[in-house]
Amino acid sequence: MSIIESIQVAMEAILANRMRSALTMLGIIFGVGAVIAAVSMTKGAAEASMERWEQIGTNKLTIMPGQMMRGPVRAGNVETLTVGDAEAIEELVSKIETVAPMKRSSMQVKAGNQNTNTTIVASIASYIESEKMTLLDGRVFTDDEADGRKKLAILGSEVVETLFGEDAAVVGEQIKIQGMSF
């Protein structure tokens, strides 16, 4: 049987069973579409995951103090790390680029008659670099300002919008965190 005869027999079979042929074609189209969609979603998820890891830093190590647990209830914090520990790690480990000791807590922030509860991070200037953050306005405080315990704050965009309104210029404005002025 030649190729032309094979094509003729195939066309006759397709035309004789139109419904079966249409359903078969539809099944193939949906199957190929599902595979393409699954591959696209997997690739998109992998790219999103890699972007997040790049933002976090694939060479980043976070060391946190332990917590005392008693059953399902946390009994309290065990303060096992100090700023001196962070300085010692930076001195003793040659491959470390940045050390940024920090303390995180949820607190109330006020500006004028507006207030919000948010996460407060107390740290040193290198924290911004280690977290790969960019500032939309203002500047990063210096190590001298941190060492002198100058009361400065860097606000996230959501906190600025809540306290001052959208697109507000807040550099130099005063806020209160747990009643302390910054």
Image: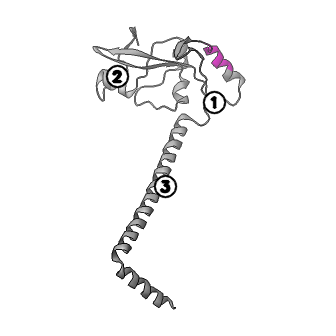
24 in the magenta segment: no
Residue 127, image x and y in percent?
53, 25
Tally of marks: 3
What's the mark number on residue 97?
1
The CA span between labels 2 and 3 is 46 Å
Task: Name above or below for residue 66 compared with residue 22.
Answer: above
Residue at image coords 38%, 14%: 108
Residue 175, image x and y in percent?
36, 15
* Residue 67, quarter of the rendered image: top right
Q: Are marks 2 and 3 in contact (CB under 8 Å)?
A: no
For label 2, the residue is 170
Per the rendered image, the range of residues in magenta is: 79-88
Task: Name above or below for residue 129 compared with residue 174.
Answer: below
Residue type for callout 1 = Glu
Can the viewer see residue 174 in this picture? no
For label 3, the residue is 39
Residue 89, image x and y in percent?
67, 22
* Residue 23, quarter of the rendered image: bottom left
The CA span between labels 1 and 2 is 32 Å
Q: Secondary structure at mark 3?
A: helix
Residue at image coords 35%, 82%: 16
Residue 80, image x and y in percent?
62, 13
50 left or right of 25?
A: right
